[in-house]
Image (tube, rainbow, N blue to C red):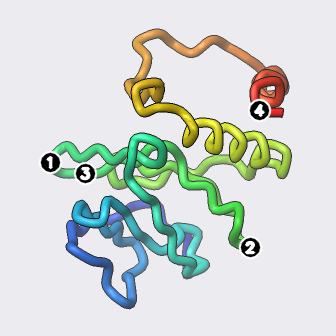
Amino acid sequence: MPRIDQLSVEFVKSVPDKPVPGTLYVSMEYASVVHLCCCGCGSEIVTPLSPKDWKLTYNGETVTLHPSIGNWSFPCRSHYWIRGNRVKWSYDMTDEEVRVGRGRDRWIRTQPDERIEHQPSTQPPPKKTKRGFLKILRQLFD
């Protein structure tokens, strides 16, 4: 199956037994979003919605999920963003980057909800090299 770059959205109570490739199933009742991996491998991807997991934005027409979808536990290791129903492909993170990112995610889950910042900054991010960013994250989570 070819890689998917555009998704359709279905708001459902529960996900069908056989999800259709290219469809993002949003269940508000179960606070989750499910889709088949956009690389075409067929793996079912479940993204729980909560302040400490994924955030869904619906503008009346399209859906955006934040943060990215990183399928590090699957053989495909695909990594992408879902923005306005479009799939924006990202780079293949190294094992070290995945380890650091998972450490950040574990830390976020230990924080009280009011400490979790989800609003986009109005300031552009500081320019940092990837190596400098990883060094900072390692210091925070090691």
Q: Where does residue 6 sit, x and y in percent of width and height?
A: 39, 61
Q: Amino acid at mark 2?
A: Pro
Q: How many marks?
A: 4
Front disc: 4 or 3: 4
Mark-to-mark CA distance, 1 and 2: 35 Å
Sort mark 3 into few (<14), some (14-19) or many (20+) by Cα contacts within 10 Å: some
Label 2 packing within 10 angstroms: few (<14), some (14-19), many (20+)? few
Q: Residue 46, position in %: x, y?
A: 47, 67
Check disc 1 and give the amino acid type: Gly
Amino acid under label 4?
A: Phe
**Secondary-structure class at tag 1:** loop
Callout 1 environment at 10 Å: few (<14), some (14 to 19), or many (20+)?
few
Q: Secondary structure at mark 2?
A: loop
Q: Position of residue 1 (x, y in %)?
A: 55, 82
Dot 2 or dot 3, earlier in sequence: 3
Marks 4 and 2 in Cβ contact (< 8 Å): no
Q: For mark 4, what is the residue? A: 141
Residue 87 in the image: above or below residue 16: above
* Other-residue count near label 4 (Cα within 10 Å), few / some / many at <14 / 14–19 / ≥20: some
Q: Mark 3: which amino acid?
A: Thr
Q: Residue at x 23, y 69 (%)?
A: 10
Mark 1 vs 2: CB contact within 8 A: no
CA gap, disc 1 to disc 3?
6 Å
* Observer-nearest of 142 and 96: 142
What residue is pinned by disc 2?
75
| Residue 62 disc label | 3
Residue 60's label in the rendered image is 1
Q: Residue at x 57, y 38 (%)?
A: 110
Q: Secondary structure at mark 3?
A: loop
- Judge depth for marks 1 and 4 and give the one in front: 4
For marks 1 and 2, the one nearer the N-term is 1
Closer-to-camera residue (60/66): 66
